[in-house]
Amino acid sequence: MGVNKVIKIAIVGPESTGKSSLTKQLADEFDTLLVPEFAREYCQGLQRNYTLEDEINIFHGQIDLEKKIVELAQKNLIFCDTMVLTVKIWCDHLFGFTPKEVLKGIAEQSYDLYLLMDIDLPWQEDELRDFPTLREHFMQVWHQELKALSANYKVISGIGDHRFLTAKSVVGDFLNDINKTI
């Protein structure tokens, strides 16, 4: 690992699994920055179903936002509230394919660790959430996609503080392992 390399940890998973809350908790705990979910801001107030063009806009917006946060990082660690693989999952589900530029962009992104949020939390209604009955399906899709990337990932389960403490422990162990190899 180079001295200036920023370690990126992506918090990913199906809808309503606590990604945004956990990302904020981890960023606060490790006193570093987080990359928010660009799609949430983009889709807020969208008065229509999103289109393939919207997904491509979200893809580019997430990448640009992440680049800006990496540049601002005072520490060599950031937490990402989702990442562009989400766009592939949504495109495949909604449109039956993923545009080549998205596939190329995913291949160019790298994360040091993925925390895959388990579906053990109760569903929380939200105007931007669409598939309460498909969480098991999307959990399997996330496993498949992360395995296809040969991603280093851990499933994070638990309710309330237990979920946070599990994630904190996984991140702490990961950072300790990295420090041992430097």
Image: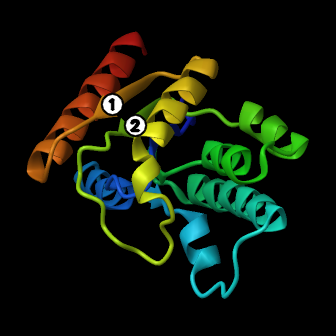
Q: Disc 2 residue type? A: Leu
Q: Is residue 134 left or right of residue 150?
A: left
| Secondary-structure class at tag 2 | strand
Residue on which the image places disc 1: 155
Direction from residue 146 to residue 122 in the image, left or right = left
Q: Is residue 26 left or right of residue 98?
A: left
Question: As shown in the figure, which amino acid type bears the numbered disc 1?
Answer: Val
Q: Residue at x 26, y 57 (%)?
A: 25
Return the residue found at the far top: 181
Verify CB contact (< 8 Å) between mark 2 and mark 1.
Answer: yes
Mark 2 Cα-neighbour bin, 10 Å: few <14, some 14–19, many ≥20? many
Q: Which image quadrant: the C terminus?
A: top left
CA–CA distance between discs 2 and 1?
A: 5 Å
Q: Residue at x 65, y 47 (%)?
A: 84
Mark 1 secondary-structure assignment: strand
Q: Which residue is mark 2?
A: 116
Which quadrant of the structure image shows residue 43?
bottom right
